[in-house]
Image (cartoon, grey):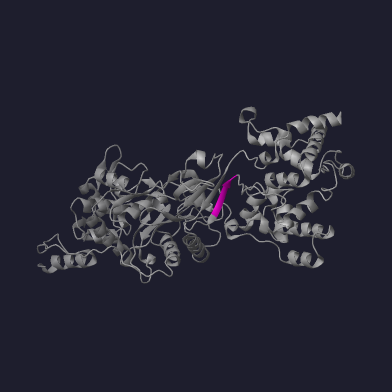
Amino acid sequence: MVSLAVGYVYLTLPEVDDLLDGRARGSVTLLDRDDKVFAWRGDQFGGVVTADTVSKHLKNAVVATEDKRFYRHFGVSPRGVASAVRINLREGRGPLSGHGGSTLTQQTAKLLCLGVAYNPADWDSEAAYVQDCRRGSLGRKVKEAIYAMAMEVKYTKNEILSVYLNRAYMGGGAYGAEAASQRYFGKPAANLTPAEGAMLAGLLTAPSSLAPTANLQRSQDRSATILRLMNEQGYLSDKDTAFYQSNPATLSEAAKAKAGGYFADWVMASGPEFFTRNTTEDVILKTTLDPRIQDAAEVGLKWVFENKVREGSKAQAAIVVMSADGAVRAMVGGRQTQVSGAFNRATQAKRQTGSAFKPFVYATALERGGHYDDTVVDEPYCQNIPGSGQWCPKNYTGKYYGDVSLTFALQNSLNIPAVKVSEKAGRENVRTVASMFGIESDLASGPALALGASESSLLEMTGAYAGILNGGSSVTPYGLVELRLLGDDNALMGSGGGIGERVISDAAARELIWMMEKVVSEGTGARAQLPGWQVAGKTGTTQAARDAWFIGFTNEYVAGVWMGYDDNTPLTGVTGGGLPAEIWREAMARIHEGITPTPLPAFVPKPKAVPNPGPRQNRTGIEGVVNGILRDIFGGN
């Protein structure tokens, strides 16, 4: 009966080449701007390997760990089964609970689910299918033994081992030895050292918990045990065993980055679902990520929180860095940077923008014929809002400065002039300009629009500022450069972003950049100054300091910083010109290391000829206030 059963299964077995890749999902490999791998997603399969092409150290480690009699049994090991039953009974479990005594051939049969292929129509999920394949009932064990013996008749030992090495899950989304070798060590499976081979073999019993990306020390401890087993079975000399136990395998730089953090999450979410989250193909995504800039942003953020923020603070922060065309070079979505699947405050959080919105008010005014030296009266101001009553905005300082220029009003983030400029330019025009620059969130309809009462994401706001830097054209922030299938040279799709239509004239953009430079060189953004570089930007602090922003740019890069609490708790003693500006400076100082400073797009101020100021007309700023008082006392100019 056993012979007939084995013979029947033998006739159903496919050719060995058809068994080497059994994934239900494909993989996604993400490359940075220099074509280097920085993240993996999905079910990674690095390519077919055989027992003859992998490193002998990996092959020996697997045999030593999983089945030292592999080359001597006929698919089932009665001695191994008896030993497992004895251990289970001694430990108080059932005879088939715990240790199974399975040979490598039986484990391979289980990986093949005894020849039953996954069909989505037959199962609630792939997890349910896998769980059924792993059942350990007596009937299942009998079928498994018959299937294993049939495999021994059909295939050679090395072919069975090859199927196992290609099918086994090794943690971190890696299926098979080649994917795991590339995932953890950044090298082919053929080049693994004894320490690396032992580490991979050690994953087979508990791939998720023992994966070196989950717990490197635990993985190294397990590999030390594997090295000892290899030594005991004659695969490794005493000298080599001692050496590799003292010098365990370590992760490659890409593996240390785990799944690519917030940037990889964002790119995966922004790409087409059938080629990213639910792909059945092996996909290569080339992205805009610059690892040097990403590291600089992370280090700058960490430095400020370690040196400027009180210990134990639960405040969060996010950073986005991009080029003027919208190519995102770095993204930090929270203080914990080495994460995957976490809440991304750079893209998912919608927060009030505060005064960081004001550049779009002044952009509208400049586009409609205004100039940097136009004046507006900063004085008590109220509006009747239908259904809400009287609304009286105040400046952050609580003071009024009389006649001030648009430049002075912006650099000191005065609220009343911003509202007046917005009302004069036309609220709907301001909404249109902001929307065209890429702020897609719903914009407030009342006069508080000018003060950033609307909510937006940091990515949107940074992209909108990039439009100012590039001369007034909108940009769509993007991280995906091209998508292609593994093995294909031609891309299936290219970038989904970049420079779009013009929003304001180049002249208006240059004038606005000049005004925003004054914010940093003379105004509220002074803490963002970079030695040797011209910096333009804007601070933003919302009501009750629930959100603090600084967004700015040099001629090279645009960067946005947001800081706040996830639960909207007010920040204590923090404004946009404080810690956010310092985070911006620390990150951008590192980003610009080694780059020769270049000036911002030039604008040469040409003051308009104006008549002598009358009783309510004076010069800009503090000088104007003083002169006004002197006129009231002494008369004249």
- Above or below for 82 versus 538: above
Left/right of residue 177 with respect to residue 515 in the rendered view = right
Tally the marks: 0
- Above or below for 7 versus 208: above
Would residue 331 be visible to someone looking at this image?
yes
- Above or below for 276 versus 233: above
Q: Report x, y in % for residue 346.
A: 45, 51
Left/right of residue 588 with respect to residue 37 in the rendered view = left
- Above or below for 460 versus 538: above
Q: Report x, y in % for residue 416.
A: 26, 53
Residue at horizontal 61%, vertical 57%?
Answer: 186
Left/right of residue 506 with respect to residue 251 in the rendered view = left
Residue at horizontal 48%, vertical 58%?
Answer: 34
Q: Report x, y in % for residue 187.
A: 62, 58
**Stretch in magenta:** 38-42
Left/right of residue 489 with respect to residue 581 in the rendered view = right
Main secondary structure found in the magenta portion = strand
Quarter of the rendering containing residue 254? bottom right
Quadrant in which the N terminus appears: top right
Q: Report x, y in % for residue 405.
A: 21, 60
Quadrant in which the C terminus appears: bottom left
Q: Nearer the viewer, residue 577 or 369?
A: 369
Q: Nearer the viewer, residue 122 or 534?
A: 122
Would residue 89 be visible to someone looking at this image?
no
Quarter of the rendering containing residue 60? bottom right
Q: Which of 243 and 514 is in front in this view?
A: 243
Q: Which residue lies furthest to the bottom in this view?
A: 532
Q: Is residue 72 magenta?
A: no
